[in-house]
Amino acid sequence: MRISFFSWLFLVPICCTLFLNFSTVFAVSHQCLGNQQLLLLELKNTLIFNSTLSTKLAKWNQSVDCCSWEGVTCNEGRVIGLDLSFEYISGGLGNSSSLFSFKHLQSLSLAYNDFNNSHIPPQFGKLVNLSYLNLAYAGFAGQIPLAISRLTRLVTLDLSTTYYYIYQLKLENPNLNVLVQKLSELIELYLDGVFISAQGNEWGQALSSSLPNLRVLSLSECNLSGPIDSSLQNLQSLSIIDLSGNNLSAPVPDFFADFKNLTSLDFSYCYLNGKFPEKIFQVPTLQTLELFDNPRLEVSFPEFPPNGSLQTMELSYTYFSSSFPPSIGKLKMLSRIDFVGCNFHGSIPDSILSLTQLVSLDLSDNNFNGSIPDSIASLTQLAYLDLSYNNFNGSIPDSIASLTQLVNLRLSRNNFKGSIPDSIASLTQLAYLDLSYNNFNGSIPDSIASLTQLVYLELSYNSFTGSIPGSIASLTQLVYLHLSGNNFNGSIPNFGMFKNLTSLRLDNNHLSGQINSTQWEELLNLDFVDLSGNSLNGNIPVSLLSLPSLQELDLSHNQFSGSLDLSVFQKFESHLMLDLSYNNLLVELNGFNISLTSFRQFYHLGLASCKLKVFPDFLRNQSRLDYLDLSNNQIYGEIPASISQSLANTFFLSLSSNKLYGSIPRSICKATNLQLLDLSNNSFSGTIPQCLIKMSRILGVLNLRTNNLNGTIPDAFPNNCGLHTLYLNKNQLEGGLPKSLANCKWLEVLDIGNNHIKGTFPFYLKNTSMLRVLVLRSNKFYGSITHPEPNATWPMLQIIDVASNNFTGNLPITLLLTWMAMMNRSQEAQSRLSYLETQVAGIYYRDMITVTIKGLMVELKNILEIFTTIDFSCNGFDGPIPKEMGELKVLHILNLSHNAFTGQIPLSLGKLTNLESLDLSSNKLSGKIPMQIADGLIFLSVLNLSFNQLEGKIPFIKQFATFLETSFEGNERLCGIPLKSHCTYEEPQLSPPTYEEKHWNSGIVIEWNYISIELGFIFGIGIIIGPLMFWKRWRIWYYKHVDHILSRIFPRLYLGKEYHKNCRHRNQRRRH
């Protein structure tokens, strides 16, 4: 069952008033009759309850008149009311209980206890005088007995239960109709969470035909179906309606607007559709309207009347077809607005800022922009403000100091900038502050020390600088302190004053020094610590490792040194997330064989680059591991067959970059939950286990590259293959690419380069529409890459490398024009630097690729989403280079070298304005080098046109003026700088035609103004080019730095030592 907090605030006074009024009317007029006291004491003795927590039963004393006991109401000495709610009662309630002997009982509450999933005793039917029965959340389960339907004097019935509880109350036999047909005096009915499972006409007519006086109807999460029956409009006394959490899948009828007494209406989580009736907003008595999470429900605001009664509007995650009307400012009683995820845009409406009674305002997850207006100061009653997940910018206004009642402030994931204003010191009631994922800068102001009630401080992923200030020592109530992803430097201060701290995140900053002076031993409640991605050094203090509540500890990517014996964790009993990867630590595994059975269970263990030489023996006893990273160590030998015992729950396993050999054990297939397996950079031999391929139903990443695996790739990819990334590069695999790989429709990265795989181009993968990276390099593929069907498409393809195969024929124009990711770049990709990566259970695994630049194999360990490359080199492609290649406007690298292309270089290549590397060498290209290319490729840093049949003068402008002779050698009829052969005639430097011209060969008009500009440019650049030609030391220095700049283009690249082979001779051998 789900009743919101504010709804409870509304309902509780009603229930309490009824109960108190009942008690007042029936005041104690006589002393408790003897038999009544005996029955009460017998009831106390048969009930099992917590006497320490009990506030009523524990105080019942036979020496005191029973009518004065807590929870007991009498009339003329007879018990007429019993309130045993919240008494921590457990166990069952037998049919013989003395409770059922109170014949005069009119009011009974056993709510909020735990009767241990027992059935409601049918003996309740004996209490025929009951007008109030409350068994809500009392732990009863099973079928509601028919006996309840005999309590015909009931005015209030509450049998609510927890919907998601494994044991649930049910209304099947009797059903809802039978239960209520004789309860005609019922005014309030609460069956929240009771499994009713009835169609709209069934439950609607059952209620409308039997309960004419009903005022409160609460049937949330009862498994009811729609549509809402029109018979409900007969219940004109209804004031509170809660049908939330039912799958009504229907529109909301207009007749709800006719209920003259309607005060609260809740249709949250009902899968509603259609258009919500605007008239309901205008019901003059309506105070609460909740439509949360009905994304197919179209909502638009009407013109609101003045002096409306609305106090709460919870409309989050509905579809709004209108903006805020100014008349919303007329709702002066509004205290709570929740408009999360409604796709609103623009600035915060002034009409909302005039609602001075607002206590809670949640506009998160929309498209609001602009700055926070100063007029927000008018909302002086505001306690909760959430503007997160929008596009707000600017700084936090000083006027926020007027919101002195603010308890919760959330501004995360916007574009706010500037520093935290000192005026925030006025928010002395603030308990929750979240400014994460913005562009705030500067240091944390000392004024934050005034926020002494702060429990949650989240400033992660901004640009804060300086040291962590000592002023935060005043925030002694802190439970969460998160400062991740900033530019904080200096050492970690003493946190000993934060006695309540449970979560500390300081990862991905520039913190340095040792962490011995932090007084970790004082933080007895600390269970989560993340200090990763800093420059912390020294030994890891034992006081940190010995924290009694510690559950998660991440110290990876630092400079911690010394040795660490994992037996320090042996004394802990709870499960632990531990990551010590990428430090200067020597992790030791001493003394484990003695007590393996008692060693602490890890669920996340990262020991990458920890100088391990053997598999940790304690892994044999780990049964809860979901993450294990032992990569980049010195582990030598075979994978133990017993490792499968530790991997039953594991989803992430990386053993890459070790010294492992032997075959891949088939026992690893017993890890049936694996989503990522990385065994790359080892010396595994033998074949790929077929069972491993079959695991790709769940397996998202399989990385077996750089091993000695042989045999064929098993043709065993399942129909429901979920593989995203497959790396098999640099093995000895042979045979064909399995046809069942086409089942992997989510495939994004396929790298099978540097093997002996043969076959034709894999057109059968055409339905893998998510494919971004395709590497077939250095195999034995052959034939044309022209697909017989015109609709072959990989719209997201950004990297294709088919170099060093035996492909032949013309380049396919239709295929090129389907690679949309190379034609245009999304606005989102341009605005942020993000990398190709696969998410596995919340962990991001970054893809890597090897590309050829300047004859060198360059391994990109982080591939930007904006990086694009085509490498068709070292094949037998012929014919002209398609002019359509110029449509791939965001291409960065193009390599068509060592083929048999003929004709002229297309002028359209000049439109590849993002191109950084162009290699057309070792072909049969003829004609002149187009001026359009020299003028358009302004980012070009690598050029190779050598060994073709080009002629004429080399354009000496822009980037073309920086290339060496080697870029043009082997073209006997080329002349001009940087070649030694001089042109026998001078050609005018013409301004290139624009690409908007419809005909490339149309006449060219000489613009002398442009020529003069070019001459000036050539003269200026000559100051640099001259020394390059005639001064060897300057030339060496210059190109050394050009190479350095080139390396900065690709983050964290690794220049391999494998040089590009002479593909020309290789291709000649193939053709013969």
Image (tube, rainbow, N blue to C red):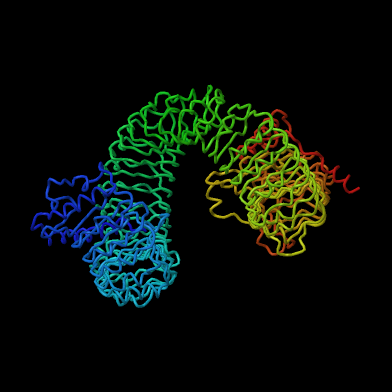
Q: Can you give x and y, in whole percent of width and height, for residue 723 in the image?
A: 64, 51
Q: Is residue 402 above or below residue 22?
A: above
Instruction: Check the image and name the residue furthest to the right.
Output: 1072
Does residue 150 appear in this view? yes
Kindly indicate the quadrant of the structure image that contains residue 1048: top right
Q: Residue at x 28, y 50 (%)?
A: 383
Residue 568, given in percent of the width and then of the height, sits at 48, 26
Instruction: Tell me where residue 133 appears, x and y as whole percent.
Output: 26, 61
The residue at 16%/55% (across/down) is 36
Eyeballing the image, is 3 above or below 69? below
Nearer to the camera, 356 or 631: 631
Q: Look at the image and tell me whether residue 1012 can be seen.
A: no
Quarter of the rendering occupied by the N terminus:
bottom left
> Of residues 774 and 845, which is closer to you in this image?
845
Instruction: Choose between 947 and 519: the one closer to the eye.
Output: 519
Among the 4 quarters of the image, the one containing residue 764: bottom right
Residue 986 at x, y = what percent?
77, 48
| Residue at the outermost left position | 29
